[in-house]
Image (spheres, grey):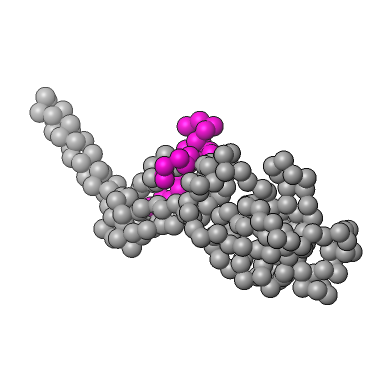
Amino acid sequence: MSESITLTATVRTDVGKGASRRLRRLEDKVPAIIYGGDTAPQKLTLSGNEILKASQIEAFYSQILDISIEGAVEPAVIRDLQREPASGRIQHIDFQRIRADKEINVSVPLHFINEVACVGVKMSGGTLTHNLTELEISCLPANLPQFIEVDMLEIDAGSSVHLSDLVLPEGVTVVALAFGEERDIPVASVTARRGAIDDAEDEVEPAAEADSADAADDEGGED
């Protein structure tokens, strides 16, 4: 689990689309809401500059954040982000409160290792493709990993790493696998080099031609 990020928020009483636009344009603030648990939802305001800095950290999107609301700290995770299409600037954030004794579903980033040394790439000239870049997991807050590693070292050309192949920390499960084996999709694949496929086909064809020639000789011998 990574070091927690703390965000300072104030309770927002001026609500509505017009009020939110004023916050963003005139005061460099980001409107937000926090909900969940046994406490009523609260509309919040956060510093635009603080959110900008935090959003550049990978853990901001998948880890537990400490939301300091006028002195009281509430642990939460991000459930939704709205961005301005042109600039990518964050316009609104939805936070969900968490409880230490209740499992949460969170999407964490995948970190691919040993890609250069991958057998299928280094030895066979295959092409490595990432099918997923993040993974939805379920765990208690204390077991939440910062990321999941995907080791590509021994993956041959023409092979894939599936969800069920991943090595997960203790107490962590993959959400998709709870819905059956058909959800065991590839996380990353190594596609065989096209020339290697052609070479394999060439090796098969002469053998087939030899078998045909032998059969023809046998027929000729019977005459």
Image location of residue 34, percent across then percent down: 73, 52
Report whether residue 81 is seen: no
Residue in the picture at 65% in, 63% down: 7
Residue 14 placement, left or right of 192 = right
Q: How many marks?
A: 0
Image location of residue 169, percent across then percent down: 41, 45
Up-down: is 153 above or below 179? below
Asked if the stretch drawn in magenta spans residue 100, the answer is no
Image location of residue 199, percent across then percent down: 27, 52
Q: Quadrant of the C terminus?
A: top left
- Which is more toward the observer, 65 or 53? 65
* Residue that protrudes farthest toward the bottom in the picture: 26
Asked if the stretch drawn in magenta spans residue 182, the answer is yes
Q: Quadrant of residue 29?
A: bottom right
Up-down: is 5 above or below 214? below
Residue in the picture at 76% in, 62% down: 10
Residue 189 placement, left or right of 100 = left
Q: Quadrant of residue 102?
A: top right
* Residue that protrudes farthest toward the front in the picture: 71
Segment tinted magenta in the rendering: 168-191
Residue 218 placement, left or right of 131 = left
- Which is more toward the observer, 41 or 146? 41
Image location of residue 160, percent across then percent down: 39, 46
